[in-house]
Image (tube, grey):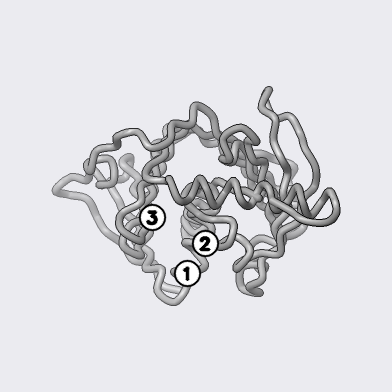
């Protein structure tokens, strides 16, 4: 369960932009417009910071687990680094850096370490899905369709549906929905659909783009007694 959560958290962090522009009929034109916005945002992207609420819904028990915190992204050369500081209900820090996903649980002073390995490209495609990824990159990993405009918490957005091209990814998420802020070209909401009606809903607010974020943010503040564990399988 911990490994599933860590991978899901990493995939979901996730991170969360999306954009588009167009051609001959309204839907393709609207989609192309959003993707072009994404290209523009990606070209200018350096850092991002946002508050988040993540809801994990399990249909079989009809229960929702909610996590709240702050997420940070930074472009470092050609790489994207991400840290999610989960503050509620229990403190947990999720860091993706140098092809490695780490989940630190201060309460038990333990870090779970996952090497992305052969899955690095797939994992990073989800990380940059919201922050730093281009429209062209989006189309490489997903079948993208435009589902119209929708207001989310007072923000005018375009809703996109993404179908993963990778069968391995589809085993985790059958489809993903992005709600893209039409004024800024960033994602303010995401929904990751899982099997049998389960889903992860991520909402982002107070988004700050290209502000200064110190190097220390992308470091785990462990102790001399912290235990590092690499789960098998």
Q: Secondary structure at mark 2?
A: helix
Say few, some or many: other residues with alpha carbon within 10 Å of mark 3 (under 14 / 14 to 19 / 20 or more).
many
Q: Secondary structure at mark 3?
A: strand
Residue lying at the far bottom in this picture: please name it.
118
- What is the x, y in percent for residue 196? 77, 57
The Cα atoms of the two marked residues, 2 and 3, are separated by 10 Å
Could you say which is closer to the camera, residue 224 or residue 120? 120
When the figure is inspected, residue 55 is found, relative to residue 31, above or below; the finding is above
Could you say which is closer to the camera, residue 70 or residue 31? 31
Say few, some or many: other residues with alpha carbon within 10 Å of mark 1 (under 14 / 14 to 19 / 20 or more).
few
Q: Where does label 1 land, which residue?
A: 121
In which image quadrant can residue 139 be found? bottom right
- What is the x, y in percent for residue 103? 37, 52
In which image quadrant can residue 96 be found? bottom left
Residue depicted at x 66% and y 64%: 142
Q: Is residue 3 left or right of residue 37?
A: left
Q: Are marks 2 and 1 in contact (CB under 8 Å)?
A: yes
Dot 1 or dot 3: first in sequence order is: 3
Q: Where does label 2 land, which residue?
A: 125
Q: Are marks 1 and 3 in contact (CB under 8 Å)?
A: no
Q: Is residue 129 left or right of residue 32?
A: left
Q: Where does label 3 land, which residue?
A: 80
Residue lying at the far left in this picture: please name it.
224
Could you say which is closer to the camera, residue 92 or residue 139? 139
The numbered mark at residue 221 is: none
Residue 143 appearing in the image = yes
Residue 88 appearing in the image = no
């Amino acid at each position: 369960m911990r490994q599933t959560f860590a991978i899901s958290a990493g995939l979901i962090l996730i991170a969360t932009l999306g954009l588009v522009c167009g051609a001959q009929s309204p839907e393709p034109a609207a989609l192309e417009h959003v993707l072009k916005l994404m290209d523009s945002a990606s070209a200018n992207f350096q850092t991002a910071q946002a508050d988040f609420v993540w809801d994990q819904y399990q249909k079989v028990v009809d229960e929702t687990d909610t996590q709240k915190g702050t997420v940070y992204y930074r472009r470092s050369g050609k790489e994207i680094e991400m840290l999610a500081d989960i503050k509620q209900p229990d403190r947990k820090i999720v860091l993706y850096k140098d092809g490695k996903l780490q989940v630190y649980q201060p309460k038990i002073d333990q870090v779970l370490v996952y090497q992305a390995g052969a899955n690095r490209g797939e994992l990073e495609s989800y990380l940059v899905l919201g922050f730093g990824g281009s429209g062209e990159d989006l189309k490489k990993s997903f079948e993208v369709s435009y589902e119209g405009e929708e207001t989310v918490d007072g923000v005018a957005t375009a809703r996109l549906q993404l179908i993963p091209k990778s069968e391995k990814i589809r085993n985790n998420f059958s489809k993903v929905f992005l709600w893209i802020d039409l004024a800024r070209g960033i994602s303010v909401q995401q929904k990751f659909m899982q099997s049998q009606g389960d889903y992860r809903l991520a909402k982002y607010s107070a988004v700050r783009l290209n502000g200064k974020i110190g190097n220390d943010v992308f470091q785990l503040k462990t102790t001399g007694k912290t235990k590092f564990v690499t789960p098998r399988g």
